Image: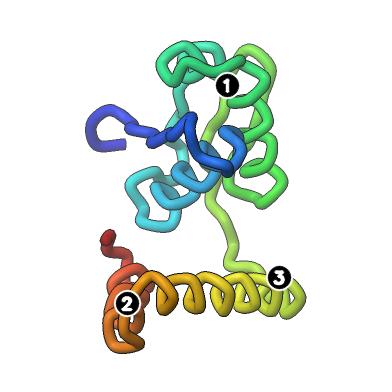
Amino acid sequence: MAGPLRVALNLDSPIPAYRQIADDLRRHLVDERLTAGDLLPPIRQLALDLGVHFNTVALAYRLLADEGWLELKRRRGATVIARNTPAVDRRQVDHLLRQLTHIAAQLRSAGMSSRQISSALRRLAEGGSL
């Protein structure tokens, strides 16, 4: 892992903190800023750094372990593991595309054009940020 791990958390967001933590860590994993063999910060340390209960971080780590990103061992912490690309889960993809449809409608309602939405999605799909 190059440099300290930064996890973004917005405590005013309606998205649960554990989900925000898992989503941000997943972004680091997908972008390969975290690679196989990297150790994540201890649960209690990350919780302290983020100002949340340690169970919140533990839940995020368990979620990523269930997805095949992490190996969790007592007293050894969370280690990033090599992840085989899973077969496409059509149900999950369909669910996510339905969510994306709702988000696109909200963006149009907020004044974004279809071209702007498309451009933003392209940047995100290529690993960029907004």
Label 2 CA crowd tier, 10 Å (few <14, some 14–19, many 20+): some
Residue position marked by numbered label 3 in the rendering: 92
Quadrant for the C terminus in the image: bottom left
The secondary element bearing badge 2 is classed as: loop
Q: Position of residue 24 (x, y in %)?
A: 45, 44
Residue position marked by numbered label 1 in the rendering: 77
Q: Position of residue 66 (x, y in %)?
A: 72, 46
Residue position marked by numbered label 2 in the rendering: 112
* First along the sequence among labels 1 and 2: 1
Return the residue found at the far right.
91
Q: Nearer the viewer, residue 15 or 65?
A: 15
Q: Residue at x 59, y 26 (%)?
A: 57
Residue type at tag 3: Gln
Q: Residue at x 32, y 77 (%)?
A: 112
Residue type at tag 2: Met
Alpha carbon of mark 1 to alpha carbon of mark 2: how far?
Answer: 43 Å
Residue 16, compared with residue 123, is above or below; it is above
Q: Position of residue 95 (x, y in %)?
A: 70, 72
The secondary element bearing badge 3 is classed as: helix
Q: Nearer the viewer, residue 20 or 127?
A: 20
Residue 64, by quadrant, is top right
* First along the sequence among labels 3 and 1: 1
Quadrant for the N terminus in the image: top left
Residue type at tag 1: Gly
Label 3 CA crowd tier, 10 Å (few <14, some 14–19, many 20+): few
Q: Viewed as shown, does residue 113 lie left or right of 76? A: left
Q: Viewed as shown, does residue 125 lie left or right of 128? A: right
Alpha carbon of mark 3 to alpha carbon of mark 2: how far?
Answer: 27 Å
Q: Position of residue 43 (x, y in %)?
A: 56, 19
Alpha carbon of mark 3 to alpha carbon of mark 1: how far?
Answer: 29 Å
Residue 70, compared with residue 68, is above or below; it is above
The secondary element bearing badge 1 is classed as: strand
